[in-house]
Image: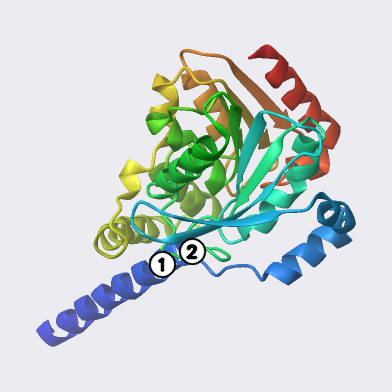
Amino acid sequence: MITAIIIILCALIASFFLTSNHLLQLLIKRRLHDEKSSIKSYSDRQIINIDYLKSLGREDITIKSKDNLNLHGFLIMNKEKSDKFIILVHGISIGYVGSLKYVETFYKRGFNILVIDQRRHGKSEGKYSTYGYYEKHDVDCWVNYIIERFGNNIYLGLHGESMGAGTVLQYTSINKYVKFIIADCGYSDMVKLLNYQIKHDYAKCLQPYLLIVAKLSRIRAINFAKFDFKHVSPIKVVHSTDLPILFIHGKEDYFVPWTMSVEMYNNKNSGYKQLLLVDGASHADSIEVNKKAYENAIDKFLSSI
C-alpha cells in the first residue's frame, strides 16, 4: 500500500514537473514563425504590399541592449521631411513581419518609422521572451537611439501589438521622450492572462491541475529567465501615467480577451485616452478586418493630443 502511494506521488510530481516545463517553454521560448512564410501569408491575404514596402527603402540598424544583447531594427525615413517618428513593436513569435501591416498607415501620415526585432526574434539576440519585463528597457534603448540621432525636439510615438502592446505600455514607467502610445490587443496582467487562457481553453476537470502548473511555471521562470510573471502587469502602469494612449482590440479575440483593453482604458485616470473595439476581429487582425475604422481612430487620436 505504501509503495503504491509513493509511486503515485512520484508520478504526480513528475507530471507537474514535465507539464510546467512544457508550459514554460511555450511562454518564454515559443517557436518563432518563419519570416519568408509569414511575409508570403501577409502578401497573399493582401495585408501588405511587398512592392510598396520595398519602394520605401530601409536602413538596417543594430544597437546594444542594457544587458549587452545585439538588437536589430530598420529605419524607414519618410520622403517628405518630417520630425514625426514612430517605433513599431511586434508580438511574440511573429517577429518584425507582424509590424509591416502598419507601415503604410503611418508612412502616409508623415511618420518616419523604426521597425524593430524584439529580443529573441529575427536578427536580435536573446534567449527568452519576458512579455515586456526586459523588453521595455530594449524599447528605451531604441528611443534613446532615435533621440540621440535626431534630437529631442522630434515627435515620437510607440505602437505595439500583443506582446508589443504589453511592452510599450510597461515602457511608460520609464518614459522620458515618447509623446503617445497605441496599444493593439494588449494584455493587462500576465498572471490573469494565463488564468484566463486555462479557463477558456481547457475542460473544467483539468483547470485545477493546470492552474497549479502555471504557478510552478512562474517559479521556474524566475529561476531560468530571471523574471516574475507577477511583475508583468501593464494595468498597474497605465493607472499612473498621463501619457496619451489609444487602446485597440478585436471583439473576437479569445487569445487576449478584449475586456483587458477595456479594463486598462477604465483604469487610466489621467491624460487623454481612447478606445476602439473592432467587431469581427480576432487576435492582432483589427487593421485587416476594418482598416478604415483603425485609421480613423488613429486620426482622431493624433488630432486630439
- Tell me the tag on residue 120: 2
Residue beneath the point at 46% across and 39% down? 144
Q: Residue at x 24, y 73 (%)?
A: 13
| Residue type marked 1 | Lys
Query: Relative to 163, is 120 above or below?
Result: below
Residue 62, percent from left and from top: 53, 58
In this rendered view, identify the residue nearer to me: 100 or 220. 100
Image quarter in which the N terminus is found: bottom left
| Secondary-structure class at tag 1 | loop
Of 48 and 184, which appears nearest the observer? Answer: 48
- Mark drawn on residue 189: none
Taking the spot 53% from the left edge, 48% from the top edge, the residue there is 163
Q: CA distance from mark 2 to mark 1?
A: 6 Å
User: Which quadrant is the C terminus positioned in?
Assistant: top right
Q: Is residue 199 left or right of residue 292?
A: left
| 251 up-or-down from 195: above or below | above
**Residue depicted at 49% across the width and 38% down the height:** 148
Q: First in sequence: mark 2 or mark 1?
A: 2
SS for dot 2: loop
Residue 297 x, y percent position in the rendering: 74, 24
Residue 98 left/right relative to 51: left
Residue 179 is at least partly visible in this image:
yes
Q: Which label sits on residue 127?
A: 1
Kind of residue sitting beneath label 2: Arg
Q: Nearer the viewer, residue 220 or 130?
A: 130
Instruction: Locate residue 230, reporting x and y percent.
Output: 32, 44
Q: Is residue 127 above or below residue 269?
A: below
Dot 2 and dot 1 residues touching (CB under 8 Å): yes
How is the rendered protein coloured?
A: rainbow
Q: Position of residue 247 (x, y in %)?
A: 61, 29
